[in-house]
Image (cartoon, helix red, strand yellow):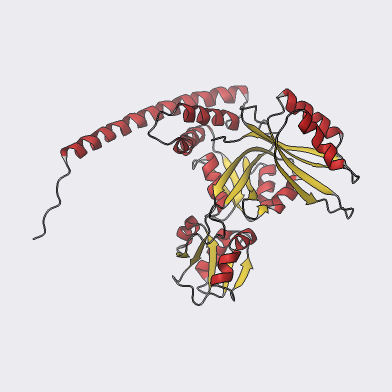
Amino acid sequence: MADSPASPLPELLSLRTQIDGLDRELLALLNRRAQLAQQVGELKKKEGSVVFRPEREAQVIDGLKSANPGPLKSESVAPIWREIMSACRALETPTRVAYLGPAGTFSEEAALGFFGSSIVRVPCANFDEVLHQTVAGAADFGVVPVENSTEGVVTRSLDLFLTTPLFIIGETSLVVKHNLLRRENALEGIRAVCAHPQALAQCHGWLSNHLPQVERRPVSSNAEGARLAAADAGLAAIASERAGSEFGLHVVAPAIQDEAHNRTRFAILAHPDRQPRPAASGHDCTSLVVSVPNRPGAVHDMLVPLKQHGVSMSRFESRPARSGQWEYYFYIDLQGHPDQPQVAQALKELRSVCAFFKVLGTYPIDVH
């Protein structure tokens, strides 16, 4: 006869009892917070103001991180409170968020990380549809990738920013771990690897070493590649573990990206008629797209106002203007908010030397 399992130590039982009691206290406090959030929602409806204010939520999280006494790590505070705020926000009105689908994409993961899981998900077939759904009002916000630490900018997103009426109200970044997924838990017999072109490029070295003769097949998203791999045993996909779980695939090879610290930055977009531009939070980024006349010294002249007014530039990217005249659009991220006098003056002077000038958005960034 097998021995019965040992009873927990009295100290362990006592600690568990204390934790159970605290969990009930936390639940009661969360419900009190939710009641206050509902009251705030009623007042917002009366005055016609919006539910989601990214600068307000950033300030709340920043204040909690600064006040955190431990032992809970400060980086754990943000996701916990985003979920709390997401659940409370959902009591006021559902937040509809468009992103590149289907289920299991990194874009979906970024959307959930920024807004919390209490959202209405609007998966889209491509980046163009993400913007279209948000412009049309079918979604309150859109989420698109703009930059990868390995492959650089996501060119389609930057090109779309030129003409869209949407503006950036926030950003989030995601550690991207690519996994080779397949119905069969083996490398043998793979005819093609399906993934988004960016993912294929980010895993170029691993694929060249381990599957040199296998076709690399670009598809609209990594999750779409996982869906195809689930339907065909001869296909493999490069996607997240969430996508693997979603489509019932084995992780044949984990973390196959060429760069261990592979991150993707995502922009959160909204329509100015339905969402006000975020007010200054104290740690903000202003994103622009500009072009200058094709003449000697034009790019230098463009940068002079920033130096003169002490405005730091954190990103500077160029894209061909497709005019046939060797002209370029420049995508610039500046530290600061237009409500700050030195930033406002620098932008005014910069605008005066540009042939094209568009503020893509001003939004809070996470400084921790």
- x and y, in percent, of residue 67 in the image: 45, 26
Q: Nearer the viewer, residue 154 or 353?
A: 353
The residue drawn where x is 78% and y is 38% is: 358
The residue drawn where x is 41% and y is 26% is: 32
- 308 above or below 244? above
Location of residue 258 by image quarter? bottom right
Count the labels in the image. Answer: 0
- x and y, in percent, of residue 363 in the image: 64, 34
Location of residue 35 by image quarter? top left
365 sits to left or right of 331: left
> Is residue 139 visible to us here?
no
The residue drawn where x is 90% and y is 46% is: 294
279 sits to left or right of 236: right
- x and y, in percent, of residue 351 in the image: 83, 34
11 sits to left or right of 289: left
> Is residue 202 visible to us here?
yes
Q: Quadrant of the N terminus?
A: bottom left
Residue furthest to the right: 295
- x and y, in percent, of residue 344 in the image: 76, 27
Q: Nearer the viewer, residue 319 or 83?
A: 319
